[in-house]
Image (cartoon, rainbow, N blue to C red):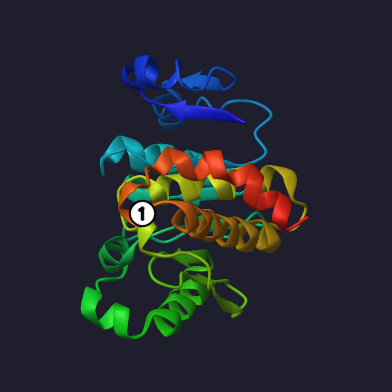
Amino acid sequence: MSSVRRQASSPLIVPVLLEATYWRDGWKKAADGQPEENIRAAAIGPGLPQTDEVQQAADQLLSADYPVILDAGAITKRTYPKREAPVILTPHPGEFSRMTGLPIQEIQQNRAAYAAEWAERLRVTIVLKGNETIIAFPDGECRRNTTGNGALAKGGTGDTLTGMILGMLCCHQEPKHAVLNAVRLHGACAELWTKERSAHTLLAHELSELLPRVWKQYE
């Protein structure tokens, strides 16, 4: 799996993830219509601003035939092309409000109903993050995830979830299972953390470090 990132982030990321591969200025190349070959799935948005260039990159990814995850800066009020491969949106309530125009308070009072409605309307999968994350599919199926806790209520943990979903998509034949498993494991990592440490001390990268232990429990 390759990371599509900004050139300026390289000095921070490369020393930490020695085994990872990188697509240099990948989101800009995607915006220019220069997609990487042999892509099985793609994610765009974490750490990126809401700019026209980011939206152009998202459009290029959506024009292909592999699963695409949109998060953070790539989530906006838009329509989505009809395609075979799934489109997966991973908004927190504020981003869901931005894409739907609904007030956050109203969303929080009707999380499952609104996620299901917009998943069907936009023909996408919506992972509405928060307490008991809601996973709504375009065919009308809607699931409530029961793993997780307040340790996840901090910056970066949602980006980690996007990466976990992407990794699962690359090794699963069934996209639904990939999304559901990633969300469940993400929450379970936070639960394992709080068995041994304070919820206040969790950093986003530590979820990934716990993943092998948690995954083993589900095998």
List the residue tagged with mark 1.
198
* Percent x, y of residue 42: 56, 40
* Percent x, y of residue 135: 53, 70
Q: Nearer the viewer, residue 130 or 66?
A: 130
Secondary element at image label 1: loop
Quadrant location of the C terminus in the rendered image: bottom right
- The three-letter code of the residue at mark 1 reads Ser
Quarter of the rendering containing residue 7: top left
* Percent x, y of residue 167: 62, 42
Q: Is residue 19 above or below residue 191?
A: above
Dot 1, how many residues are within 10 Å of its Cα: few (below 14), some (14-19), or many (20+)? Answer: few
* Percent x, y of residue 15: 45, 15
The residue depicted at 66 percent of the width and 56 percent of the height is 178
Q: Count the numbered circles shown.
A: 1
The residue depicted at 73 percent of the width and 44 percent of the height is 171
The residue depicted at 46 percent of the width and 25 percent of the height is 26
